[in-house]
Image: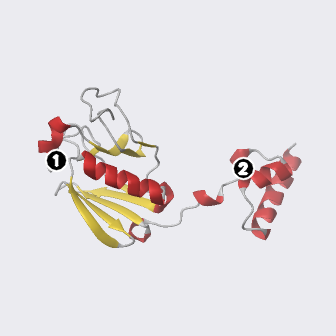
Amino acid sequence: MNRRFSYGILLCCFLTSVSADLKANDLMSAGRFAAASVQRQDSVPTCREMECPVFIHVVKSRQRLYLYVNGALTDTFRASTGTRRHPTPNINMRPQGPTFVKYTSRKFPGGNYKGLGNMPYAIFIKGGYAIHGTTPGNFLKLGHRASHGCIRLHPDNARKLFELVNSYGLQNTWVKVHE
């Protein structure tokens, strides 16, 4: 059994090196490999930080989100990051997803924005931390520390960011959050 698995891995490596166009599904049907043993080509990291087509830079001390597209600063948004009791962690990574147009927090329920829940246009970075729109009751808090750790934006700005990230893909997006 182990020998068969080793041959399968060798065959997988050989086929991948021979044909860059071969997709994971082709390998699975040709050699009947487990999906976990084949990495899809589109999941290979293509960029890092400013090299990414979409670079989201959040500066907590300024409560601002700076949006870069193809290396050029295209927008700056007022944001709200976590309070001292619920801090937003420093982050420097590709967002892990998922993304949701409509999302309601079960942990912090309440409020709604035009039927899209209390966290519209959510882009999850890691774990429970996301960049998302906020509800009208929190609009005046933008530009100040006010969240439970997420990065809040005005829903119009969150939608713009959400659509941009979804058009380029999470694999072509990088998020950096620091003081």
Q: Quadrant of residue 76?
A: bottom left
Residue denoted by label 2: 37
Q: Quadrant of residue 141?
A: top left
| SS of the residue under disc 1 | loop
In the picture, the quarter occupied by the N terminus is top right
- Left or right of 17, for residue 135: left
| Rendering coords of residue 7 (x, y %) | 86, 54
- Left or right of 55, for residue 41: right
- Left or right of 40, for residue 174: left
| Nearer the observer, 160 or 69 | 160
Residue denoted by label 1: 142
| Rendering coords of residue 173 (x, y %) | 43, 60
The crowding category of the residue bearing disc 1, from other C-alpha atoms within 10 Å (few below 14, some 14 to 19, many at least 20), is many
Q: How is the image coloured?
A: secondary structure
| Rendering coords of residue 167 (x, y %) | 46, 57
Mark 1 or mark 2: whose residue is earlier in sequence: 2
Residue at 76%, 44% in the rendered image: 34
In the picture, the quarter occupied by the C terminus is bottom left
Please state which amino acid type lies under the numbered disc 2.
Answer: Ser
Residue at 78%, 54% in the rendered image: 26
